[in-house]
Structures are given as C-alpha cells and as structure tokens.
Amino acid sequence: MQLSCGRKIVKHYSRFSFYGFIEVVTELYDLVKNIDFLVKEDIANVKPDCVILIDYLGFNLRNSEYVKTLNY
C-alpha cells in the first residue's frame, strides 16, 4: 500500500469511482460496507487531529456528521 502524509492508504479512491444507475445498484452493498469501515473503524481508531473532506459530496456529508460526534 502507498503512504500518504505518514498514513497507509486503506481504501483507494478508484474503488468508489463508477457511475450510472445499474453500477450504483450493483455496488450498493459494498459502498455501504466501505463507508462504515472508513468512518466508524478507521477514523475512530486513528483519531486524527483534523479530517479534510474533498470531493464525493454524499460520502463526505455522511462522514462529517459522524466525525462531529467523536468529540476528541
């Protein structure tokens, strides 16, 4: 895995790059599973000083709501 600012990349963004109704529906389970992992496990375990959310509006809005609840 690559390192980014001292952190190992746990999920590459290309895993989330698809479009179209059929593609979203077929990947929905994996999307939800990956969102839960990235937010509830990785961010909570690492406890970063800040989280910078770039692009992927729907994904980031959900993440930002959860990150606000961590209060650390």
Image: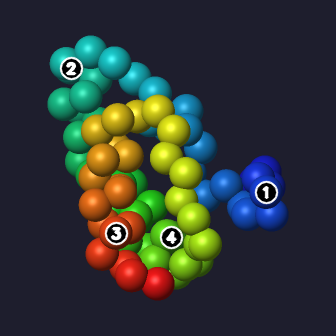
Q: CA distance from mark 1 to mark 3?
A: 22 Å
Answer above or below: position of 25 versus 5. Answer: above
Occupied quadrant, residue 48: bottom right
> Residue 26, can we see it?
yes
- Circle 4: element type: helix
Q: CA distance from mark 2 to mark 3?
A: 33 Å
Q: Residues within 10 Å of mark 3 (few under 14, many from 20)?
A: few
Q: CA distance from mark 1 to mark 2?
A: 35 Å
Occupied quadrant, residue 46: bottom right
Residue of label 1? 5
Q: Earlier in the sequence, mark 4 or mark 1?
A: 1
Q: Nearer the viewer, residue 53 or 15?
A: 53
Position in image of residue 50 (x %, y %) = 57, 65
Q: Nearer the viewer, residue 72 or 59?
A: 72
Looking at the rendered structure, which numbered label has been put on residue 68?
3
Looking at the rendered structure, which numbered label has been put on residue 42?
4
Residue of label 2? 22
Answer above or below: position of 22 versus 55. Answer: above
Residue located 60% across and 58% down the image: 10
Position in image of residue 3 (x %, y %) = 80, 55
Q: Earlier in the sequence, mark 2 or mark 3?
A: 2
Residue located 37% across and 46% down the image: 60
- Camera-near label (4 vs 3) is 3
Q: CA distance from mark 4 to mark 2?
A: 29 Å
Q: Residues within 10 Å of mark 2 (few under 14, many from 20)?
A: few
Contact between marks 4 and 2 (CB within 8 A): the answer is no
